[in-house]
Amino acid sequence: MRIDILTLFPGMFSGPFDESIIKRAIDAGLVSINLHNIRDWADGKHQVADDYVYGGGPGMVMKPEPIFAATEAVLEMAPERGPIVLMTPAGRKFDHELTVELAAEERLIILSGRYEGFDARVHEHLATHEVSIGDYVLSGGELPAMVLVDAVVRQLPGALGSPDSVEDESFSHGLLEAPHYTRPPEFRGWEVPAVLLSGHHAEVDKWRRRQNLLLTAQRRPDLLERFSLSKEEKEWLSEKLDEAF
Ligand code: 6GU
């Protein structure tokens, strides 16, 4: 996959992309991440990329010409085609489903804006997707772009150490993930559940599945609505929930 990110602050991306899973994926050739400074396509001595809002109002808006010019130039840099994703708090809420959808693409172009956002013509005539990472306002689209890239890259085949890791995670099966323990078996008097030390794989699987269900019922009942439980699981869960309240 090729990812191109257009931003006024390419420097913000070093750090997150230079460590851990994303770095490994880049080094392994699973993805290339290319940063482009929108200002390079802004005209004039001062390469101004923003301007006042028509009709009045606070703040500045990113001008359309540099964004269109940058995107068109970046498209020319490689033959692959794919979505042009504009990061905006007014976009579609980013979730696992959209992550998987984007991970299937050959190429992503991501537009990260600052100020009050982009001139509306960028939304209407350039972007193919508008994406938000949640219901709060950030100072720009850079952090959201990093969030999106991280989530997408870890879905690429081979990005995680074990091929099972991605399937086991929260949200891929639609439930929150069971608690994990590591050594020691007892820490400050708090013991690891005995079943996890038992070596009985079927029992461990059953315990994990039940913990997934319990955690999801307690914290994200909205996720459980889409889920079909066996009669036995329903009974166990309602008993557990009665105990807890
Ligand atoms: Cl994509 N951009 C900004 N500026 N704020 C956000 C966001 C995006 N998603 C949530 N908050």
Image: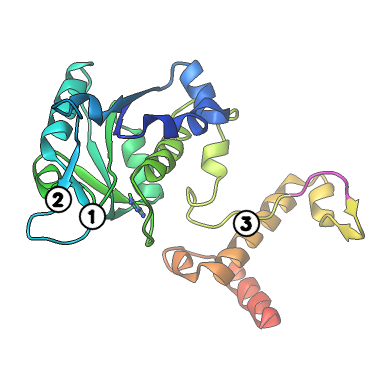
Inspect this view and state whether residue 91 appears: no
Horizontal relation, residue 125 to residue 239: left or right: left
| Label 1: how many Cα within 10 Å (few below 14, some 14–19, many 20+) | few
Picture disc at residue 59: 1
Residue at image mark 3: 209
Label ID, residue 188: none
Question: With respect to residue 90, does 143 lie above or below?
Answer: above
- CB contact under 8 Å: marks 3 and 2: no
Callout 2: SS: strand
Q: Nearer the viewer, residue 18 or 157?
A: 18
> Percent x, y for residue 56?
11, 60
User: What residue type is disc 2 on?
Assistant: Tyr
- Residue type at mark 3? Arg
Judged left or right of residue 40, residue 69 is left
Provide the major secondary structure of the magenta segment: loop
Q: Which residues are magenta?
A: 181-185
Q: Which mark is residue 52?
A: 2
Q: Position of residue 141 (x, y in %)?
A: 33, 45
The C terminus appears in which quarter of the rendering? bottom right
**Mark pair 1, 2: CA separation:** 7 Å
Q: Say which residue appears at 21% left-offset and 22% top-offset.
A: 74
What amino acid is at disc 1? Gly
